């Protein structure tokens, strides 16, 4: 007799497993110096927190997310009830995905921006994430626990609830969102990366935000750049080859002159 695992449990643990597997792949690819946005030397010298501390911080956030996810699924009903009550045509699933993406982007943009503009919140909470001046893959979810709860966990819950997706659909959506978030922090510009082809919000775009000149720009995450463009916080950049190999995302001339 096989062991049945509920969609709710899978929706909780699969995105966590995906996070570490996908991050691990990027850590193995980190030796590709010709595709890095920063050198290994910069990564070691500029970052203000050890990788061991980052791992502990991410695991803490994921543990809190898991507890909230289990509670949310318990409140919203079982997977059997949800699956029985929902048709699963491609159009409906696509609508739910797009709705969840827009909800998540909207929530994260405005909250992320507020964490930057409120000096108290930045100093005591969001600055923890910006200790990673040179982002890398498994540091994507390195946040203060309270910020992680508000920005990621609540944002994910709203995306789930407002899109109307089932727990089974959420397995795929949150795994996709996790992969995208890790990719945005990977610090690499690999040729043929589909996220760089289909999304303007990518590793170079988010790297600009992690630099001192970009902390008031490029707040959008993890999918689109629409809110930055609409509200004037979009910082255009150019990619230039570094002498020691790899790329560097630099603001365009009008921002250099500011």
Image: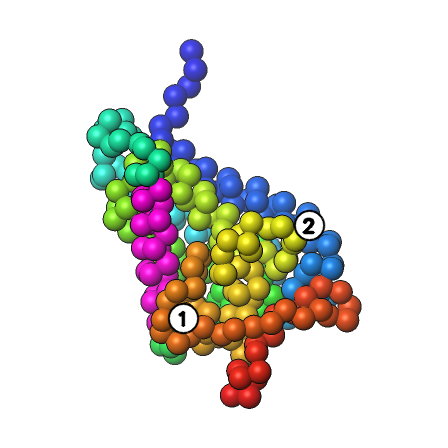
Q: Secondary structure at mark 1?
A: helix
**Residue 252 or 71: which is nearer the viewer?**
252
Residue 45 covered by magenta stretch: no
On residue 229, which mark appears? 1
Q: Relative to 106, is 254 above or below?
A: below
Q: Is residue 197 left or right of residue 217?
A: right
> Which residue, given by chain and number where applicable, does mark 2 sit on?
29
User: Which residue is situated farthest in the front direction here?
Assistant: 91
Residue 251 seen in the current view: yes
Q: Quadrant of residue 137?
A: bottom right
The CA span between labels 2 and 1 is 32 Å
Horizontal side of residue 52 vs 125, given as left or right: right
Look at 65% across and 54% down and name the residue there. 190
User: What is the count of numbered marks?
Assistant: 2
Few, some or many residues within 10 Å of mark 2 (<14, 14–19, 20+)? some
In what quadrant of the picture does the N terminus appear?
top left
Please name the residue shown 68% across and 47% down the image.
28
Sequence-wise first label, 2 or 1? 2
Dot 1: within a 10 Å radius of its alpha carbon, few (fewer than 14), some, or many (20 or more) residues?
few
Residue at (60%, 51%) from the top-left corner? 193
The residue at 43%/64% (across/down) is 225
Element assignment for label 2: helix
Q: Is residue 112 magenta?
A: yes
């Amino acid at each position: 007799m096989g062991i049945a695992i509920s969609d709710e449990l899978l929706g909780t643990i699969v995105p966590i497993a995906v996070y570490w597997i996908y991050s691990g792949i990027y850590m193995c690819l980190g030796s590709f110096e010709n595709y890095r946005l920063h050198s290994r030397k910069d990564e070691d010298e500029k970052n203000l927190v050890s990788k061991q501390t980052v791992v502990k911080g991410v695991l803490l956030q994921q543990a809190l997310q898991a507890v909230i996810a289990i509670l949310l699924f318990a409140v919203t009903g079982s997977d059997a009830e949800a699956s029985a009550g929902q048709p699963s045509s491609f159009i409906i699933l696509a609508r739910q995905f797009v709705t969840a993406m827009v909800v998540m982007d909207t929530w994260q943009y405005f909250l992320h921006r507020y964490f930057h503009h409120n000096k108290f919140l930045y100093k005591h909470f969001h600055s923890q994430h910006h200790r990673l001046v040179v982002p890398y893959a498994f540091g994507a979810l390195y946040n203060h626990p309270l910020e992680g709860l508000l920005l990621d966990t609540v944002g994910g819950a709203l995306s789930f609830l407002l899109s109307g997706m089932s727990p089974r659909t959420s397995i795929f959506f949150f795994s996709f969102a996790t992969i995208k978030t890790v990719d945005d922090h990977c610090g690499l510009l690999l040729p043929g990366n589909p996220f760089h082809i289909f999304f303007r919000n990518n590793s170079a775009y988010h790297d600009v935000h992690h630099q001192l000149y970009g902390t008031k720009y490029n707040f959008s995450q993890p999918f689109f750049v629409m809110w930055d463009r609409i509200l004037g916080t979009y910082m255009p950049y150019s990619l230039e080859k570094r002498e020691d190999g790899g790329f560097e995302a630099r603001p365009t001339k009008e921002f250099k002159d500011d």
